[in-house]
Amino acid sequence: MTEDNRPKFSTKFGVIAATVGSAVGLGNIWRFPYEAGAHGGGAFLLVNLICVVLIGIPVVCAEFLMGRSSRRNIFGAMSSLAPRGGKWWRLAGFLGVASGTLILSFYAVVAGWTLEYLFQSVTGNLTAAGVRESHTEFSAFTAGWRCVFWTVVLLAINAMVVLRGVQKGIEKASNLMMPLLFVLLIVMAVNSLLLPGADTGLRFLFSPDFSQMNSATILSALGQAFFSLSVGLGTLTVYGSYFPADTRIVRSASIMAGLDTMVAIIAGVIIFPAVFSFGMEPAAGPQLIFEVLPDIFSQMAGGAVWSTLFFLLLLIASLTSTISLTEVGVAFCVERWHMSRPKALAATIGFVTFFGIFCALSFGPLSSLTVSGMTIFDIFDYVTSNIFLPLGGMLVSIFVGWIVDSATVDYELRPAPRFLRGMIVFLLRYLCPLAILAVFINNLLG
Ligand code: TRP
């Protein structure tokens, strides 16, 4: 496809809404709090911030510029930007597309849970009976086929947006949903801060406990940074390929990373004060917000309203992210195999639904199917976040730092000041690949 007839985001606001929409998702509201809860709160936050600034932002810039200069998806970008068609680099692009599909498979399951919880909140069931057995209820729900149903519904809503294309689908949906998301976040955070004993939760989130810090903290903080920023597998490359020629890449990357981190922190501010105020356990793992929060909502004044708002927030956040993940597969199928958009979408969603069902069932009928204690769902989550994303991030940084023509890189990073452009290239060449490698090796040995 040539530069001219490729669809583009139509406004600056659209660029920010779409990229922030991709970044802000379950990663911020569901994953960040339980990872922070399991790895010492503030210590995790601190390492995470360092990873975002020194490794995340440069890799985001790298992905944006790969997309914009090639006007292709990550597979196409790697073949067209590498000298001689980049035979091996295309494989890396393919790995990106494949892991996007795998992430979407377990992501859609959790996003589907939010639909059930939203439904139960609206009907008042979720907060009905005082202190309830949220744990049993969560287990009962995820053990059945009902959660497969919601996964499929979620994928269908998602497909309806993606089908409408870049401007009328992705951009328009993001423009509507992102402002609403920020309003919801702020309202919820104020409510949490007004709870008695909120300060214990804040202390947990903001004061680092370094005794909890080890190589696992660092790997998780890096994996979390990558997951939350949507880097490492071509989501941002494909969005970058829809950037107008005058989009400022470094600035957009920084705004995106800034807002994304802010949302994770606000989510922590919503969740931890509530958790401590009601005497719950912060290290509950992936179930944290689904088991602990309903209990809290049911004891809170106006609980049904708060839980509706919260799960609506979570739904909006996850939809804008699943849309971006779906677009990776769709753009790949359209460009590589010349499929029409509807066919490419059907292929991508078909794949994801297949894997998604296995992930959904791994809390129930398939829960005994485990490899070293991890269910299919856990394996998808662990392998993609802790192996594929860092690996993808490392390959992207080596690719842009060393392989892509440096004049092209410099041109795309303009009009950022020269010092900043040099700094980003330096980080991409040396720090990003080495830091990721070091964390990897450390984790393998430890
Ligand atoms: N960043 C999103 C979140 O925080 C999830 C996501 C969207 C993602 N696209 C991605 C994660 C690409 C990794 C790679 O929920």
Image: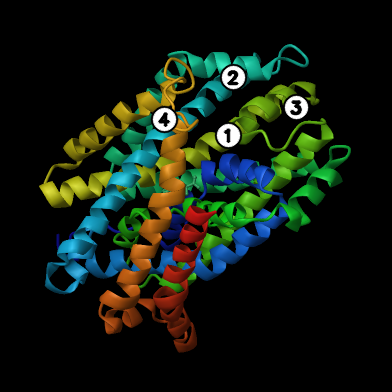
**Element type at marker 4?**
helix
Question: Which mark is on residue 286?
Answer: 1
- Which residue is tagged 3? 296
Residue 379 to residue 126: above or below: below
Q: How many labels does the image show?
A: 4
Residue 297 is situated, as x and y percent measured from the top left of the image, at: 73, 26
Amino acid type, label 3: Ile
Q: Which of marks 4 and 3 is in front?
A: 4
For the residue with label 1, is its CB less than 8 Å from the closest atom of ligand 1?
no
Q: Which residue is drawn at 62% across and 21% down?
A: 121
Left or right: where does residue 329 sit relative to residue 321? left
- Asked whether residue 78 appears in the rendered view, the answer is yes
- Which residue is tagged 4? 376
**The C terminus lies in which quarter of the figure?**
bottom right
Disc 3 crowd rating (10 Å Cα; few below 14, some 14-19, many 20+) is many
Left or right: where does residue 285 sit relative to residue 337? right
Q: Quadrant of residue 126?
A: top right
Amino acid type, label 4: Ile
| Earlier sequence position, callout 4 versus callout 3 | 3
- Which residue is tagged 2? 138
Determine the CA span between mark 4 and mark 2: 18 Å
Disc 2 crowd rating (10 Å Cα; few below 14, some 14-19, many 20+) is some
Q: Nearer the viewer, residue 157 or 134?
A: 134
Question: Which mark is on residue 278?
Answer: none
Residue 298 is situated, as x and y percent measured from the top left of the image, at: 75, 21
Residue 321 to residue 15: above or below: above
| Earlier sequence position, callout 1 versus callout 3 | 1
User: Please, which residue is most extreme toward the bottom here?
Assistant: 418
| Earlier sequence position, callout 4 versus callout 1 | 1
Disc 1 crowd rating (10 Å Cα; few below 14, some 14-19, many 20+) is some
Determine the CA span between mark 1 and mark 2: 12 Å
